[in-house]
Amino acid sequence: MPLPHSDLLMILPNLLMDPQALSALQGKHEVPLVILSWLVALAASYASLEIIRLVGSTSSSLWRRTWLTAGASVMGAGVWSMHFVGMHAYRLDFHVSHSQLLTLLSILPAIIGSLVAMTLLCREQLRHRTLITAGTSLGLGIGVMHYSGMAAMRMPATLYYALDLFLASLVVAVGLGVLSAYAYRLCRLENGKAHYQRYAFVSALCISLAVSGMHYVAMQAAWFVPLEVNLPHAHIMASHWLIYAISGAAVFAALLTLLAIKIQRRLQDSERHGYMTQRRLLEVIAALQDGVVLFDDGARIRLCNNAFEQLTGMTHAQLIDSDITQVPYAKDSQALTPTIHRALVSQGEWSGMVTALRSNGDEYPAWLSISRVNYANSKDRDYVALLSDRTDEQNAQQRIRYLAYHDMLTGLPNRLALQEHLTTHLKSPLKKGRYSVIALLDINRFKVLNDSMGQDIGDELLRQLGSRLQQAGEQMYAARLDGNEFALFSSFTATEQAAAEQLAHQHIERVLATLTADYQLHGHTYPCKINVGMLVFCPREIDSVGQLFKRAGLALLEAKRQRDGEPKRFCSALEQKLEEDITLERELRLAIDSSALSLHLQAQVDGQHEVMGAEALVRWHHPQQGMISPGRFIPIAEQTGLILPLGAWVLKEGCRLLGEWQHDPRLKDLKLSLNVSVRQFQQPNFVEQVIATLDATNAPPERLTLELTESLLMSDPEGTIDKMLRLRQLGIRFALDDFGTGYSSLAYLKSLPLDTLKIDIAFVKDLTLDMQATPIAATIIALAESLGLDVVAEGVETADQSTVLARLGCHVYQGYYFGKPAPAAEFTRLNRAASFTAS
């Protein structure tokens, strides 16, 4: 039925007159119904957003159209229901009715606006233009729906609108509609997917505010001018049952929609799952690189993938329904079949490495795994087999093993490979008359080559030497142990040990002749010298591989010590000396810690044979071995680092003696000389250590002389001079010990803050025997006088030596002729008594 002409005119708002100038009226709202109307709009908005989300995940165009239509209807009905409740929440002083047809038709703009907005929001790309259009469509649909519903009012009054609020209602509807579209876009972002419910509620809230806000702003814009001056006050009786019925229906429709959406999602998930477990499962199996085959109890193939077809060289048609035992999948498939069958019957599975065959007949390692498949609600049983190519894995394992047992620079076996080879050799059945030899080789002065010509040159030498070792012959097992150290191992037959040693020496000499021939290193000719330590042994007499390396290593140490190019053979004396050195090191450490050492003092006298001072010499009286020579334990202290605590003890004890002498007028003028090792002097805190010791013992620094060796000057001349100058400022004196036996003293002698040169004992003892010793001693004395230095002659043992030295100009002596080294207490007592007698 078409609308009357008057109804069509009333749809257009009356904006031409000022309603306040016409004594217009406005109604009031019931707050509970206002809240109810907003909740209806919120429920419908949230349900609509869920529909948009569902449509976005639906691929069927029919379902998309169906759900969009349903969603737009739910949204439009919700907007209309909100308007209906809101209109009944509005109270006027005269009777109001509504045109039923126009009221029902006002739902259409809300549905159309919602449909346009939802359709746009379902797009994959939500650009700004799309969002603005969707929000505008939603807002305009709400606005047209509202003003159409207002036009359906029938009452004894004329309806006017305030222009500003009328426009504001449209702005609210469109603005909040656009805002809700942007809020929904948050749900589509990555962060929004994780917090979808939160962002969806925000968007639904914006839509409900757009609907409610537009409605109530528009109601504030409405003014009513009664047609009669004195209208009776007739309050509208609220049809509460209708209000709640329509509200309930709208909310119920939203809940049904949400329930339908949930069911639809379950169906979609189930459909996707079913699709995956059927068609896609076959695609996944087909894409596997390993061969997969499914066969039944009768060994008939029911399913296989492309990889299995390629491995066997058979087509899919040839394989399906064929007997799997007749398929040549492995080299020994016929022999494997009974074993696999028994395992499947008893255990339901079998796995193991097989030698598989490719279609061209090539063999390759593979892992075959077969498992029984039991189906639910069925007694049928199938078996699935997986054939995995392990060629790459095997090659990788072989590569890893090669890297673990070989040296990358030379390609020779490494220490680990040699150890395992020797272990196998020692455990093998021993034959009578079999001897073996292991030789350790060390390139002489290799570090000098590296430092002078560069590491590339050193690596090239190692590569060429390794190549020569590989060509030494099949009877020799060569390995690179570490750095520039190599090893050779060989076995041979001999009647006795002596013959075996002779044969081994000949073998090693032949190899050395090859290894020591000149090398061409990047255009440089390099004559290589090699130190060799060898051990000839009978395998049944050796306990472990470690014992072999230990003994051969001792022989190599002896070869490096002598450096004559001759191979050195292990002998028991080397092992005995090593054990003695280890024992001596341990006992020396205990002696230092327990202060079991002592200082012996050897007097230094002037030309009148008066004692001027003494040199402190450390002595060790062993509880079982007696007095141990410093020449025995000082080298061990140097090698093991014990020279540092030993030197600290000597410094502390010497300064203690000087401190005690200061309390005796007969001894306070004596000087004391202490020997300082190279390692001790090179310590960064050596100067601070000396100062602290002097302070702790109250020793006068001007009475202390530190004796240095020429090797110290060669190792670090600049650092040595700096420390000497700092100590010299305290008054400490310095003496250069064993002058004339070094190589570089004269280069630094002028710049060193020295006070004394000590003529080495080697020149003093030959003064009366060797015609060359006297000129050398005279030269040293003359050099010292020209530099303003004192001279002390060591090792003076005869009166003739003293006379010659005095004639040459040396007037300070030290040696057995004037007194042997004596314990510090005895030296103190004798010199105190001598001073008392002289006085």
Image (cartoon, grey):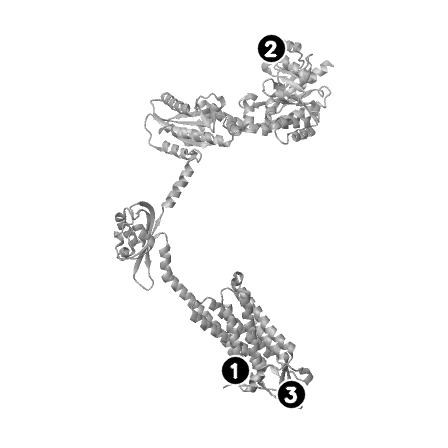
Give the image location of residue 590, x and y in percent.
56, 29
Q: Is residue 817 visible?
A: no
Question: In the displayed structure, would residue 719 be above or below residue 58?
Answer: above
Q: Which residue is mark 1?
A: 104
- What distance separates the C-alpha of mark 3 from that of mark 2? 150 Å
Q: Amino acid at mark 3?
A: Pro
Q: Which residue is mark 2?
A: 767
376 relative to 732 in the view: left or right: left
Question: In the displayed structure, would residue 110 be above or below residue 472?
Answer: below
Which numbered dot is residue 226?
3
- What distance separates the C-alpha of mark 3 from that of mark 1? 26 Å
Q: Earlier in the sequence, mark 3 or mark 1?
A: 1
- What distance separates the C-alpha of mark 2 from that of mark 1? 140 Å
Q: Amino acid at mark 2?
A: Leu
- Residue pictured at 34% horizontal, 32% vertical: 428
Q: Amino acid at mark 1?
A: Leu
Number of other residues with Cα within 10 Å of mark 1, as a class: few under 14, some 14 to 19, many 20 or more: few
Question: In the displayed structure, would residue 102 be above or below residue 607?
Answer: below
Question: In the displayed structure, would residue 821 be above or below residue 330?
Answer: above
The foreground one among 105 and 664 is 105
Give the image location of residue 197, x and y in percent.
53, 66
The foreground one among 795 and 754 is 754
832 relative to 709 in the view: left or right: right
